[in-house]
Image (cartoon, rainbow, N blue to C red):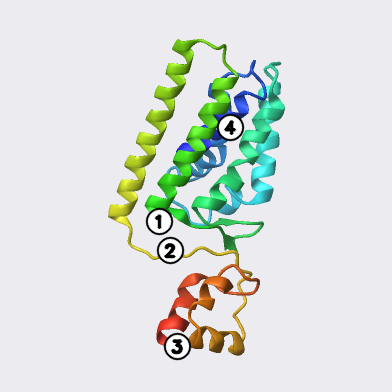
Amino acid sequence: MYAGHAAVALALRRREPRLPILPLVIAAFGPDWLELLFMIPEKREGMAVFTHSIPAVLIGGVLAAVLYSAARRPGSGTIFLAWVLHWPADLFTGRKPLVFSEPLIGLDLYKLPAVDFALESMVVVIGCALYARALPPRGDLRRVVVILGAALIAMQGALDLALSVMRNSEWTPSFALGAAVSARTRDTIMVMPWTACILHFAPRTTHTRKRWRWTVHGAS
């Protein structure tokens, strides 16, 4: 999630009006900043487990809150919350680790750019609306929020357009445990392909790509 993280920061701003928006936005994107940092000076594989797994997100949130509280300013709890909410937000758009590098879970909506754009635009609208309610009821401030929301949606639209052009892999959402389905389940999918949709998020199923191969090609 991209624009959605900024929208989460805007929504949380209402929780602590004295908290500047900049550190809140930085915290909302915190795991992404860390992963980018780990890629310097060269790209490394498997860094998500150290930045986007649940333990990593919790530890990062605590460290960010402690660092912010060292400045003796209010809102460290909100900084922690902004950092931690990065994980459930990414659950919609990507596939992230739980504790270890496997399994990866998530709806993987980056592979469906139109759906991703609709979801993130909705999150931006909600976040801007909550942010506006924390501001004094002045027309000029409300206009700034509208412009900010429009800019976030426009940036998200540009990103999703680029994703739609560069997309070179199929949609593979998964909440799977990584174990193969039974032969009986596979036979059921072969006879009634529509059941693949129902089984998609069922426990102990593998990801969509393998189920699609079972349905279309009968591969094991």
Residue 112's label in the rendered image is 1
> What amino acid is labelled 4 in the image?
Ala
Q: Earlier in the sequence, mark 3 or mark 2?
A: 2
155 over 188 or under it: above or below:
above
Residue 218's label in the rendered image is 3
Residue 8, image x, y percentages: 56, 34
Q: Earlier in the sequence, mark 3 or mark 4?
A: 4
Considering the numbered disc 1 on the image, is that residue within a helix, a strand or a loop? loop
Tag 2 residue: 171
x 58%, y 32%: residue: 27
Q: Earlier in the sequence, mark 4 or mark 2?
A: 4
Image quadrant of residue 134? Answer: top right
> What amino acid is labelled 2 in the image?
Trp
Residue 50, image x, y percentages: 60, 49
Q: Earlier in the sequence, mark 1 or mark 3?
A: 1
Residue 193 appears in view: yes
Give neighbour class at mark 4: few <14, some 14-19, many 20+ (Cα, 10 Å): many
Structural distance between the alpha carbons of marks 3 and 2 = 19 Å
Residue 9, image x, y percentages: 56, 30
Structural distance between the alpha carbons of marks 4 and 2 = 29 Å
x 40%, y 86%: residue: 217
Give neighbour class at mark 2: few <14, some 14-19, many 20+ (Cα, 10 Å): some
Structural distance between the alpha carbons of marks 1 and 3 = 26 Å
> What amino acid is labelled 1 in the image?
Leu
Residue 27's label in the rendered image is 4
User: Circles 3 and 4: CB distance less than 8 Å?
Assistant: no
User: Circles 1 and 2: CB distance less than 8 Å?
Assistant: yes
Q: Earlier in the sequence, mark 1 or mark 2?
A: 1
